[in-house]
Image (cartoon, rainbow, N blue to C red):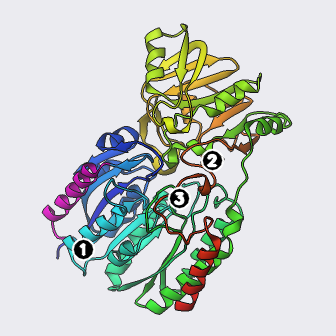
């Protein structure tokens, strides 16, 4: 008898509708990876979902049909022809390979194409059409996924990350693969309970590493799985920077043949989720107030969090507002900061290490959020920016910041990069020879991962009020397409929606 065959495919990226760039295939190659066919097996030994899937399937006596693996750093919209080429390649490998008994897909859940709001739903439907209704299809998703009705309809199960910062991607891949093996071995017919919520929340208070609101939600979801009929339960925070008509936080519960139980569990968890909504609010500080508070803390470094330019949320990384403010305030303590500006990095390289020059830097990629800054200083280092991630969704992967320079304008050491890459920890500083312990203030463009990357060295951190496409309050952005009844934009309408959801349930 032929061994069962499981297909594995990945197309994972988070979009930001407030970033002006439209990205193509090169974005995946430069900021993550793009692997076709058997190249997918090269992800073995890594930290991501595909590595976890392969690990769980290895002892199960099944064959694996590799489709395609594409992962990229968060960015703006994805070009339509890029998405269609990736989708076509995945489907061609699926149709041209041997018949499969199940499919595992790894996606983000908040990707947006120029002309498609819900590519994950579109991909799920296309895979479903290719394999039929009797072949189980399971998708892993970032907990920031925007789960749509189409995704729920086309998939047999959805499995989300449970940790934020994201350090459980390998385990998520394992969970999904083991669930698929269980479905095949026991002939399970899954039933998916889905409860959408009219909420767009900031992720800053959504860490699962303490006893905060999202940690409690995740714990309650995991507890549901103690019921043998509940196969998996997930809570989704949604990528809050996508401007689409069908959007919001959600809960998904997958049960074994019991639709009523799946629906009831999803609805009850969603009602608890709604009750916690105000706990996610944050209040950012001016740079001046953050510096004053940081000076009162013994030791260093103090992290100054420019979360509105988070490259992991789609920001271009080209913001220079923090540096501008530090100079205006006359800060004298050693400071590190980063900016993405390919032209400025090139000028530094042309001038050479040790050269002094006047440099215009910042807001070169997405100029809507500020003006460039003119600095006089010296070039301290030039490198190719290659580094390997210590952990997270790209753990073990080697990427490059592109041509990179360290430009010294005392007291600030400015790392000027050519490519916006995902922020996990302090790898970008270390790869250019900067020791975080030597700075009093470090500008960090990250909403969450700094809690891991700097946990052994930081002495404090402060959230800054600086303009950008990934702010800590969704109301700072000009959405055009989201529903009117959504929190926190209109709490009264949103509350009415939730009441109706409870009544319908």
Name the residue rendered at 77%, 22% in the picture: 332
Q: Secondary structure at mark 2?
A: helix
Residue 94 location (% of width, % of height): 19, 63
Spatial CA span between label 2 and label 3: 22 Å
- Could you tell which of marks 1 and 3 lies nearer the N-terminus? 1
Residue 117 location (% of width, % of height): 37, 61
Name the residue rendered at 24%, 72% in the picture: 4
Question: Which region of the structure is painted magenta?
Answer: 79-99
In-front residue for pair 328/239: 328
Q: Secondary structure at mark 3?
A: loop
Residue 52 location (% of width, % of height): 42, 59
376 displayed left or right of 260: right
Name the residue rendered at 61%, 13% in the picture: 376
Q: Which residue is the site of mark 3?
A: 240
Q: Which class describes the residues within 10 Å of circle 2: few (<14), some (14-19), or many (20+)?
A: some
Spatial CA span between label 1 and label 3: 35 Å
Q: Which residue is the site of mark 1?
A: 101
Judge whether 344 appears above or below 423 on screen. Answer: above
Q: Which residue is the site of mark 2?
A: 452
In-front residue for pair 224/46: 224
Q: Residue furthest left?
A: 96
- Could you tell which of marks 2 and 3 lies nearer the N-terminus? 3
């Amino acid at each position: 008898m032929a061994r069962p065959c499981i297909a594995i495919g990945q197309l994972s990226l988070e979009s930001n509708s407030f970033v002006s760039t439209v990205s193509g295939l090169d974005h995946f190659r430069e900021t993550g990876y793009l692997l076709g066919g058997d190249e997918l097996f090269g992800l073995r030994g890594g930290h991501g979902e595909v590595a976890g899937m392969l690990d769980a399937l290895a002892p199960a006596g099944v064959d694996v049909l590799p489709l395609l693996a594409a992962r990229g750093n968060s960015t703006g919209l994805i070009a339509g022809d890029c998405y269609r080429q990736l989708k076509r390649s995945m489907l061609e490998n699926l149709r041209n390979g041997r018949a499969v008994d199940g499919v595992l897909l790894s996606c983000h859940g908040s990707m947006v194409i120029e002309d498609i709001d819900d590519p994950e739903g579109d991909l799920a439907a296309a895979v479903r059409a290719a394999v039929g209704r009797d072949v189980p299809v399971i998708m892993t998703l970032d907990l920031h996924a925007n789960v749509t009705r189409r995704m729920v309809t086309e998939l047999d199960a959805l499995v989300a990350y449970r940790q934020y910062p994201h350090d459980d991607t390998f385990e998520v891949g394992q969970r999904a693969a083991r669930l698929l093996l269980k479905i095949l071995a026991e002939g399970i017919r899954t039933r998916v309970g889905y409860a959408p919520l009219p909420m767009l929340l900031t992720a800053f208070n959504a860490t699962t590493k303490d006893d905060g609101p999202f940690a409690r939600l995740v714990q309650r979801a995991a507890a549901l799985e103690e019921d043998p009929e509940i196969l998996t339960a997930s809570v989704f925070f949604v990528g809050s920077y996508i401007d689409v008509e069908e959007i919001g936080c959600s809960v998904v519960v997958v049960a074994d043949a019991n639709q009523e139980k799946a629906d009831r569990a999803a609805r009850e968890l969603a009602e608890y989720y709604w009750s916690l909504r105000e706990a996610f609010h944050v209040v950012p500080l001016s740079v001046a107030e953050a510096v004053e508070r940081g000076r009162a803390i013994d030791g260093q470094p103090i992290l100054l969090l420019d979360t509105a330019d988070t490259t992991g949320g789609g920001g271009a990384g080209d913001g220079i507002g923090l540096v501008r403010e530090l100079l205006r305030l006359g800060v004298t303590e050693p400071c590190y900061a980063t900016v993405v500006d390919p032209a400025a990095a090139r000028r530094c390289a042309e001038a050479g290490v040790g050269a002094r020059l006047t440099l215009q830097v910042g807001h070169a990629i997405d100029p809507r959020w500020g003006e460039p800054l003119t600095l006089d200083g010296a070039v301290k280092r030039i490198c190719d920016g290659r580094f390997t991630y210590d952990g997270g969704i790209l753990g073990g992967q080697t990427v490059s910041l592109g041509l990179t320079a360290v430009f010294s304008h005392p007291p600030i050491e400015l790392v000027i990069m050519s490519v916006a890459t995902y922020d996990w920890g302090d790898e970008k500083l270390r790869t250019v020879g900067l020791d975080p312990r030597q700075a009093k203030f470090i500008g960090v463009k990250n909403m969450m991962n700094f809690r891991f990357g700097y946990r052994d060295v930081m002495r404090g951190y402060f959230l800054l009020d600086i303009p950008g496409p990934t702010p800590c309050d969704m109301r700072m952005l000009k959405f055009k397409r989201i529903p009117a009844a959504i929190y926190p934009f209109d709490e009264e309408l949103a509350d009415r929606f939730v009441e109706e959801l409870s009544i319908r349930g």
